[in-house]
Amino acid sequence: MEVLDEPVWRARAAAHRARVERWTLPHRERRRRREPHPVLDFLFTYYSFRPQRLEQWHPGPDVVLQGGQEYLDGPGYVRDGAGVRLDLAALPDRVAGTAAFVGALLAATASRPPRLSCFGLHEWAMVYRTDAPRHGSVPLRLGTAGTDAVVESLPIHCTHHDAFRFFTAAARPRNAVAPARADQVAMEQPGCLHATMDLYKWAYKLAPATPSDLVADCFELAADVRELDMRASPYDLSAWGYTPVRIETPTGRAEYAKAQAAFAERAAPLRTRLLDVTQRWARSHTSGRV
């Protein structure tokens, strides 16, 4: 058990807040101006963790916060002498079920080699043969006909259910597989950009058991991956300062695969750390104590 004096943990909490405010403050300002952002809004809309909760610091289990009485207002925190600590066994049982699913998913994903040949075509399949693309105010780099031609010229092999479910009806039969929600544990693989971004989702769904430094690490990775995801998309994002990864060309596909491999490598230790969180959950749920 680590015991943190109040000045120490308050400094860590302030540093965490400053770290994530790089994204949360501009997001709040854009919302105030009612100014959508086709790349960054995803981090706060598709992912449902509110900026205020992202900014809040949690130490994770096995840490006593001296003088941290305000934490007693949150779930799972108990008194420990002159301080407070997180007791996993005191958190709602429903979170243990989430932890069991997340643990199974992450372990299965980590057991597979990364697949690096999808080239981000999921975003193209979401606008294939439709007059109503998801980001209707953002132009397509190649126009409608050019975008459709790219989809028709390359094989599509998307393994991520939450990407596949946004495919247009015309694009769905072109995918090599039809991943359903029930297939997630069986199909998810570490090369998938969306599986990598989802490490952030699993981190915050296990909060406050997930230490906030791990949540922030996963968020930063998701932000970087999202940029590649959209730079490789069919949208023209030059007005927002993004240069395209032209996956319609061999050079662009090679650039995408190289970046995809680097993200898979960067995600691996975060996945391992999240697996440790789920295993601690399992132990606490079985024993009734940490």
Image (cartoon, grey):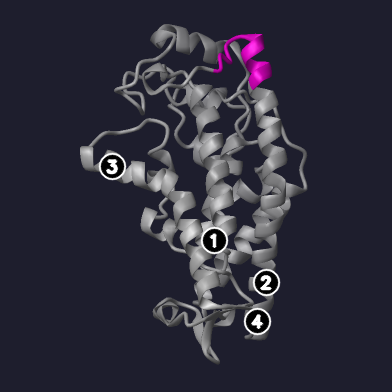
Would you name the residue on which mark 4 appears? 290
The three-letter code of the residue at mark 2 reads Arg
Would you name the residue on which mark 1 appears? 212
Would you name the residue on which mark 2 appears? 280
Q: Residue at x 36, y 24 (%)?
A: 133
Point out the stretch of residues depicted in magenta: 245-255
Q: Nearer the viewer, residue 195 or 152?
A: 195
Using the numbered discs, state the Cα–Cα distance from disc 4 to disc 1 in whole angstroms. 19 Å
Badge 2 or badge 4: first in the primary sequence: 2
Question: Residue 29, which numbered label?
Answer: 3
The N terminus sits in image quarter: bottom right
The vertical placement of 177 against 198, above or below, is above
The vertical placement of 175 against 209, above or below, is above
Q: Position of residue 11 (x, y in %)?
A: 50, 65
Mark 1 Cα within 10 Å, few/some/many (few <14, many 20+)? many
Q: Mark 3 and mark 1 in contact? Answer it, CB < 8 Å.
A: no
Badge 3 or badge 1: first in the primary sequence: 3
Using the numbered discs, state the Cα–Cα distance from disc 3 to disc 1 in whole angstroms. 24 Å
Kindly state the secondary structure of the residue where label 4 is placed.
loop
* Residue 189 in sight in this render: no
Q: Mark 3 and mark 2 in contact? Answer it, CB < 8 Å.
A: no
